[in-house]
């Protein structure tokens, strides 16, 4: 994703600013870095946590670095994240950058405690071979562990990192390293602490979370983790799953979807294309029919399930007929929330060496996909009219339904669960009014 988030500093006196591009993991890790930098006593710094998913994400990061240097030249700029990991030299060539830190070291307290900008002999770049990381992770970060610094209604819980697959378009395995899982007991214990701290909802996140467990004793599957959390943390009111690969959904996960009402009815699928030949050239592990069958199976188990999906427009060699299969997939899978990515060649990936499409064609196909997604979202919003939905209040007059649909509503205390009657919709969100007094404050 090309999203970026600026995390407000916990201690403005130290003048520590952070800027995060990309995924939820980056947001969590950015918060952890802010906390570590503050604890180390660092001042007048800006931490830029980059994303490497698309060339546009890298361009935005470089643009932000130059802007920060112009506006606050007294601050030291520290660059980290996937783009810094995969191409540290491109940031080392920027005179605005003071330090480049690799993904393996960025959340370690010692990394920030040892930073000394006055030491002219200190290495400017600290990026190691991330493929040398140990296979099993013994601790990951949850945004809720970071206290009020997190600033989120829901707690994001990192249960897995890295990826062992090699999709031909993707550079992320080289930014994140091999797949590593957090042990089940640690995840359960962490979520139990988050609930005790007032969180109503936890979101399981990672780079390839359906691969969770392959590196743990007994090789448990992801569905077993989901069931264990719900069984051992009965006070958790809402559990949500981030992006998954449909081909890796195991029977325990399907069983939890069917029978666990606290598991929210929203799945974001990594589909990427609706055409079998393009899926093969992407080196994806599912076929079109398997994606459609999965969505139908899940909706039969959970009729209120809502699907989002990542789809790439303009992958190399994609012709108009192939692209039409991706357009049709929106209806055939019943997709509601589309993340459309115009294809962007990433240096070092096999897809970058394939015959490329004209950029104008890529942009035009991305536009058509987004328009198809807008139609699907409008139909979903229309179908909610007059219903009463259970919402979790966020900041700024926004709440989220169980299926992750945003609802604009009068400001409610952040973290409150309440019922609301849906009275209308905008192009992207529902409109609602609180219904009755059945409310639970955080």
Image (cartoon, rainbow, N blue to C red):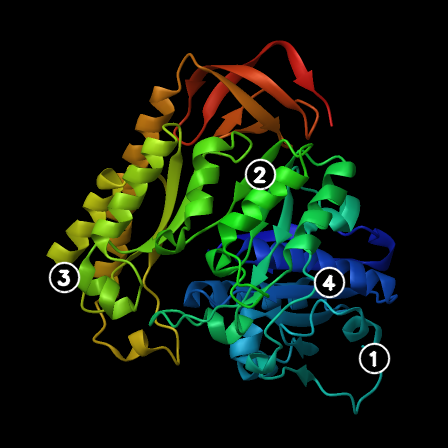
User: Mark 3 vs mark 4: which is more N-terminal?
Assistant: 4
Q: CA distance from mark 1 to mark 4?
A: 16 Å
* Residue highlighted by disc 1: 116
Residue placed furthest toward the front: 218
Label 4's element? helix
User: Mark 2 vs mark 4: which is more N-terminal?
Assistant: 4
Label 1's element? loop
Q: CA distance from mark 3 to mark 1?
A: 53 Å
Residue placed furthest toward the left: 321
User: Mark 1 vs mark 4: which is more N-terminal?
Assistant: 4
Q: CA distance from mark 3 to mark 2?
A: 40 Å
Q: Where 285 falls versus 368 (above or below)? A: below
Label 3's element? loop
Residue placed furthest toward the bottom: 121
Label 2's element? strand
Q: Nearer the viewer, mark 3 or mark 1?
A: 3
Residue at 62% x, 70% y is 136
Residue 285 percent location from the top left of the image: 31, 63
The numbered mark at residue 239 is 2
Assess disc 2: are there few (<14), some (14-19) or many (≥20) residues with their C-alpha within 10 Å of its C-alpha. many
* Residue highlighted by disc 4: 33
* Residue highlighted by disc 3: 319
Q: Are dots 3 and 4 in contact, CB under 8 Å?
A: no
Residue 112 percent location from the top left of the image: 79, 71
Residue placed furthest toward the top: 436
Locate residue 45: give its quadrant. Answer: bottom right
Answer left or right for 365 relative to 441.
left
């Amino acid at each position: 994703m090309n999203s970026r988030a600026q995390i407000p500093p916990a201690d403005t006196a130290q003048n520590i600013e952070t800027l995060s591009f990309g995924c939820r993991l980056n947001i969590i890790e950015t918060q952890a870095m802010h906390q570590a930098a503050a604890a180390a006593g660092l001042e007048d710094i800006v931490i830029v946590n980059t994303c490497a998913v698309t060339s546009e994400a890298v361009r935005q990061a470089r643009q932000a670095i130059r802007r920060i240097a112009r506006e606050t030249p007294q601050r030291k700029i520290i660059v980290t994240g996937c783009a810094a990991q995969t191409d540290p030299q491109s940031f080392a060539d920027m005179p605005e950058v003071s330090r480049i830190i690799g993904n393996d070291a960025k959340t370690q307290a010692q990394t920030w405690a040892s930073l000394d900008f006055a030491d002219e002999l200190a290495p400017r770049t600290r990026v190691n071979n991330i493929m040398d990381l140990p296979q099993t992770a013994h601790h990951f970060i949850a945004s809720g562990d970071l206290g009020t610094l997190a600033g989120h209604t829901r707690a994001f819980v990192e249960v897995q990192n890295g990826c062992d697959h090699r999709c031909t378009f993707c550079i992320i395995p080289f930014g994140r390293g091999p797949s590593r899982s957090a042990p089940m007991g640690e995840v359960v214990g962490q979520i139990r602490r988050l609930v005790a701290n007032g969180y109503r909802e936890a979101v399981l996140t990672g780079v390839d979370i359906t691969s969770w467990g392959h590196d743990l004793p007994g090789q448990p599957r992801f569905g077993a983790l989901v069931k264990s959390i719900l069984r051992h943390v009965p006070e958790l009111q809402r559990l949500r799953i981030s992006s998954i690969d449909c081909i890796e959904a195991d029977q325990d996960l399907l069983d939890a979807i069917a029978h666990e009402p606290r598991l929210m009815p929203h799945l974001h699928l990594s589909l990427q294309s609706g055409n079998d030949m393009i899926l093969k050239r992407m080196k994806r592990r599912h076929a079109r029919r398997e994606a459609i069958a999965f969505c139908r199976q899940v909706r039969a188990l959970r009729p209120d399930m809502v699907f989002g999906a990542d789809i790439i427009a303009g992958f190399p060699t994609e012709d108009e007929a192939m692209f039409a299969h991706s357009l049709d997939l929106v209806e055939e899978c019943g997709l509601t929330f589309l993340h459309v990515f115009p294809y962007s060649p990433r240096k070092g990936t096999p897809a970058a060496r394939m015959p490329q499409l004209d950029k104008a064609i890529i942009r035009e196909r991305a536009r058509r996909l987004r328009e198809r997604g807008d139609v699907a979202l409008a139909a979903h919003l229309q179908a909610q009219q007059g219903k009463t939905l259970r919402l979790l209040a966020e900041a700024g007059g926004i709440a989220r339904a169980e299926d992750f649909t945003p609802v604009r509503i009068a400001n409610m205390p952040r973290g409150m669960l309440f019922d609301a009657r849906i009275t209308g919709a905008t192009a992207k969100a529902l409109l609602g009014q609180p219904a009755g007094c059945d409310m639970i404050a955080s």
